[in-house]
Image (cartoon, helix red, strand yellow):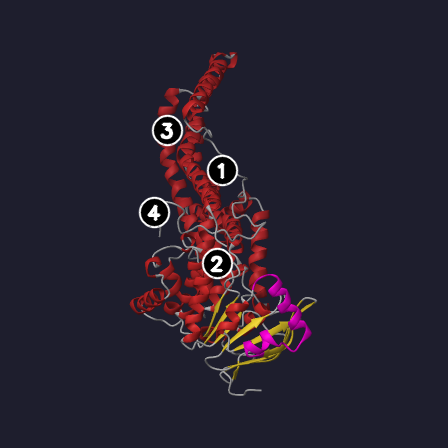
Amino acid sequence: MSTGSGPGPDVYFQGTPGVDPRAPGPHGDRSSRILFGGRGGRSGWVALSSTIAFFGVLTIVIVNSPGWSAEGGVRDQFFDGEVFSGSIWEIAEGFLVNVLIFLIAEVLILVLALVLSVMRSLPGPLFAPLRILATGYSIVFRAVPTILIIFLLGYGMPALELRGLPSGPNADIFWAIVALTLVYSAYVAEVYRAGIESVHPSQGAAARSLGLGRGQALRYVVLPQAVRRVIPPLLNDFIGLQKDSALVALLGVSEALRHAQIEQATYFNFTPYMALALVYLVFTFPQVLLVDWLIRRDQRRRQAGGTA
Amino acid sequence: MNVRASLRVEDVHKRFGNLEVLAGVDLAVDDHEVVCLIGASGSGKSTLLRCIDLLEPVDSGRIVIEGADVTAAGVDQNAVRRKIGIVFQSFNLFPHMSVRRNVTLAPRKVLRMGEADATERADDLLGRFGLADKADEFPDRLSGGQQQRVAIVRALAMQPDLLLLDEVTSALDPVLVAEVLDAVRELAQQGMTMVIATHEMGFARDVASRVAFLHAGRILEEGPPERIFSEPSHEETRTFLDRIIAAGRM
């Protein structure tokens, strides 16, 4: 779909003022710029040397503070090399369960949220019940804490002993996925909706004037533009979901946080938690960079010129 | 009233809130006729065209196309729009599609034409309007004049019986106006039935079989361009034309 260099195909400037599909997701704006804004050359060197000096001094101060290297100090408790190498593989193995949970949830969320946002944008009195349903859904699942939904489903549903649903340890994973899907679909539906509303009504009118039905106009003209605009906030929500997948440890699912807890209790040392933090950081950081890059690319395109 | 006209607008009223935009419009357009709607901004030209294309519901009155009341309840509006093309002031091309895709979308999805047939029709039309080399470009790489010609081609690809043009040159740089007007002129010569809202009086005089002057939501007078432009019978028409002349648009 790309035309190569210069502003590509997906450059639209007809957004409705006041509707910003890049509004912060459920956990605030995680897309702050990390990298320096230097332009290379002299200012680049100044930025580099001042950065090295700043973090160098900071490291020296921390490492030489009394609490750092004392017996049972920060270094021993949180940064023990042996504990790290002894626990990291266990934790990484547990993280595969998290990956499984949030990957399945993400696919389900993309579908459910799209259905919800389309339901909410249906016109006319006939569809009022669907609009109310979608709106109510979005209100409830954004209002209730995620952990509460996880408890309600994870502990509550198996207690009903319904037939045909997974049982045993798989049941925990199943209900964890369902809970995360329900909660995050409410957020992602809002993101989709902002995207749909940011596509100028004249686009829909142009499509309808050619004889396309309402559904066809939505499918071929409005949604493709809307989805492209909301990819950065969508990814932000997914990063939040990936972090929240740690909440399912509270159901007893044998995932990364649970593994880290066990390792922590084994070594009586907090390094396994730091190891897990590192796993999350390594996994999430590239996604954060991607989101930032996408947003900056969009901004550049917006500034590069516009259509009427 | 001309009963056999291909388009008849009968006593159409339309209000937005407290503002009565159309206050009883009557208009008949024959096959192969080109009717130019003139009048000040806000006189109801655009609203009338949008009502004819059923993009706005009328409050009262009827719109009859080929003898069928299209404003009646239960009419398949998509089927009506299929036979009417409209070109907007702001082009409204689909920015996420190439020019060719813009043109083939409706033939493929609405007329269920095959990819090859739709592409052939599109390329043929694009060639006729001097856009053959732009088929693979995206709209934001085209000039305003090119975009507007693509919009015309996109409407023509549905082979409409009636084409509505809503101030198609108003958003263009003056140097780009001519290329779009030439394209419309060519359509008129080929016998396309058109209703054209325009501020280009020279063009209207040139291309119109009839000119209708809209004032405060009504068609105050209509007739052949020679008569409307040289001896208008209403004071309001005279005032409007004087203003246009003063503004150097005629």
Residue depth check, mark 1 versus mark 3: number of the one nearer the observer: 1
Mark drawn on residue A88: 3
Tag 3: residue type?
Ile
Please give the residue where the numbered disc 1 appears in the rendered image: A31
Q: Nearer the viewer, residue A62 or A68?
A: A62
Q: Which of B202 and B135 is in front in this view?
A: B202
Looking at the image, which residue sits at the far left? B116
Tell me which chain the residue with mark 3 is part of.
A
Asked if residue A71 can be seen in this view, the reply is no
Instruction: Name the residue at 32% across, 58% down.
Output: B133
Q: In this view, does B72 lie above or below A65?
A: below
* Residue closest to the eye, B202 or A119: B202
Three-letter residue code for mark 1: Ser
Please give the chain letter of the residue carrying mark 4.
A
Pick whichever of labels 1 and 4 is earlier in the sequence. 4
Query: The disc labelled 2 sits on which kind of residue?
Result: Val
Q: How crowded is mark 3: few (under 14 residues within 10 Å), some or many (20 or more)?
A: many
Q: Do the residues labelled 3 and 2 touch (CB within 8 Å)?
A: no
- Image-based side of A74 in relation to B121, left or right: right
Residues at marks 4 and 2 touching, judged by CB atoms closer than 8 Å: no
* Residue identified by numbered label 2: A115
Q: Label 4: state its secondary structure.
A: loop
Image coordinates of residue B65 in percent, x first then y, are 51, 81
Please check the rendered image and state whether residue A174 is part of the magenta-colored stretch, yes or no.
no
> Which of the two labelled residues, at mark 3 and mark 2, occupies the earlier sequence position?
3
Q: What span is colored magenta in the figure? A: B223-249
Q: Position of residue B241 (x, y in %)?
A: 62, 69
Location of residue A85 (image quadrant)? top left
Tell me if label 1 and label 4 are in contact, CB under 8 Å: no
Where residue B73 sits, quadrant-wise, is: bottom right
